[in-house]
Every structure is written in structure tokens, then in C-alpha cells.
Amino acid sequence: MNSGQTQFQASCHCGAVRFQVRLTEGLGSARRCNCSYCSMRGAVAVTAAVGDLTITAGEEWLTLYQFNTMQAKHYFCSKCGIYTHHQRRSNPDEYSVNAACLDGVSPFDFPEVPVNEGRSHPCDRPAGSGPDIAGYLRYFPLTADWKPR
């Protein structure tokens, strides 16, 4: 994984939906969220400007899911069910993109990922009234000499 890379080809699990994307901050924007939806979805997301994501195949397979305020637009492949990206409620000019959809990237490539505080959405609270980060998730791959405790 090249953390400075910004241009990616991407697809859902079955390959029906394909897209290309330019990430605003490369893979440095990787994060998770603890809102009710993201907690269940579990994806690591990275950021792209709305104009920097182009569906190249399978747009007809994308399904839109919205809930609560109906402002965020979550897209997933209706064939395999994989979440590909969403237009953010906190910044409608940006997409969050499922890092696992990016060619050559796995969510396990990130040793530590910040978790945004989404249970109290930033749009629903006064600025500075609470933390933006709820915590961090870490991944420690096992080594050959690992033994259970």
C-alpha cells in the first residue's frame, strides 16, 4: 500500500460497480465512525471531493440508502451488497469511499484508524462542544512465533 497515492481504480466485491477516484488526502484521511449506521457497516473510509469520483461501470447496480435526516447518501452494490461510497452529511461536497474497494488496499493495511464521534453528529451539536474523535482502532497482525495466552 502506497499511503501517498491519490489516484485509484476501485470496485465492489463482485465487480459489477467500478469507479475511479482521486483521494483528497491520499490514504491519510482513513477513518471509521461510531454512528448507528457506520458501527454496523464497519468500513474504513477515505475522502474524495464529489467531482473526483467517476462511476465507470455498473451505475445501474448502485442502490441508494438514506436514513434519519435523509441528508447523507449511502451507495452500495445491489448485486453483492458492498458499500462503495457515500456523500457526507457533514460536508456534502465530499464523498467517503470504502477503502476496501480501492485496488491494492485492504482495511488491514492501516495499523491504526481514528474513529469519528458520530453518535453525536457534528451537525447536531455546537462547535467545540465535544470531541471529534471517539477513539482509535488498531490492527496487530500475528507473527509466526505468536502463541495464545
Image (cartoon, rainbow, N blue to C red):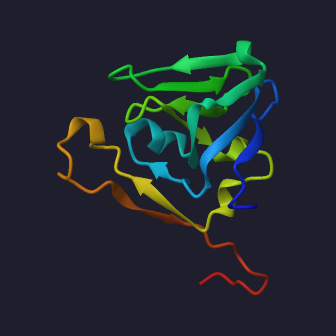
User: Where's residue 118, x and y in %?
Assistant: 35, 44
Q: Residue at x 27, y 43 (%)?
A: 120
> Residue 7, relative to residue 64: is it above or below?
below
> Residue 122, relative to residue 146: is it above or below?
above
> Residue 30, relative to residue 63: is it above or below?
below
- Is residue 116 shown left or right of residue 30? left
Q: Residue at x 65, y 55 (%)?
A: 107
Question: Quarter-wise, where is residue 76 in the image?
Answer: top right
Locate the N terminus by quadrant: bottom right
- Is residue 31 shown left or right of residue 111? left
User: Where's residue 69, x and y in %?
Assistant: 32, 22
> Residue 11, relative to residue 62: is it above or below?
below
User: Where's residue 63, x and y in %?
Assistant: 61, 17
User: Where's residue 7, x and y in %?
Assistant: 74, 45
Q: Nearer the viewer, residue 87 or 43?
A: 87
- Is residue 20 shown left or right of residue 44? right
